[in-house]
Image (cartoon, rainbow, N blue to C red):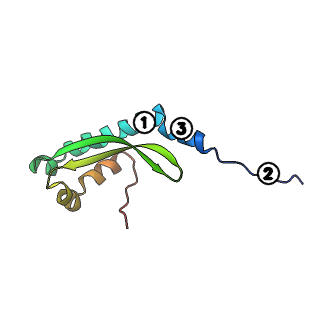
Amino acid sequence: MARSRGFEFDHAGMEELLRGPAVRKRLAQAAEEITAGAKSDANVRRHGLDVQTRSFESRSHGYARAGAAVDLDGFAGVPVEAKYGVLKRSAESHGLDVRGSS
């Protein structure tokens, strides 16, 4: 019986992939879809909130990766999200699994 030799994780290759243009493009696309959904929400319009999208780079688990965030801007953003779940519903409507942090 052949003995398994295992494998070596290519950290540099993973970092290159997660920072690459294809991942950045898909993240930006998803963020824009979520933003559009949130902007059309009646609660966002009623409270006069701006929905902002931003891109960033994060370093964790030994490698950097691209990221995107969608925020409700303004003082009322946090309570509106807490009460109505505007961003959560918009993200879920685009197939994302949204979970709270503990």
Mark 2, secondary structure of its residue: loop
Q: Nearer the viewer, residue 95 or 80?
A: 80
**Would residue 40 be visible to someone looking at this image?**
no
**Label 1 or label 3, whichever comes before in sequence order:** 3
Q: Is residue 18 left or right of residue 83?
A: right
Q: Amino acid at mark 2?
A: Arg
Residue 20, x across and y down, in percent: 49, 34
What residue lies at 36% left-to-right and 40% top-to-bottom?
A: 30
Left or right: 79 as drawn, with respect to 96: left
Q: What residue do we see at 81% from left, 53% from top? A: 4
Q: Position of residue 85 (x, y in %)?
A: 25, 57
Q: Position of residue 100 (x, y in %)?
A: 35, 62
Residue at mark 1 to residue at mark 3: CA–CA distance? 10 Å
Instruction: Identify which amino acid the numbered label 3 is placed on.
Output: Leu
Q: Which residue is mark 3?
A: 17
Q: Secondary structure at mark 1?
A: helix
Residue at 47%, 33% in the rendered image: 22
Which residue in the structure is indicated by mark 1?
24
Image location of residue 27, percent across then percent down: 40, 39
In the image, taking residue 65 as reference, residue 45 lies left or right, namely left
Q: Relative to residue 41, is residue 23 depicted above or below? A: above
Numbered badge on residue 83: none
Q: What number is the disc on residue 5?
A: 2
What is the quadrant of the N terminus in the image? bottom right
Q: Residues within 10 Å of mark 3 (few under 14, many from 20)?
A: some
Q: Secondary structure at mark 3?
A: helix
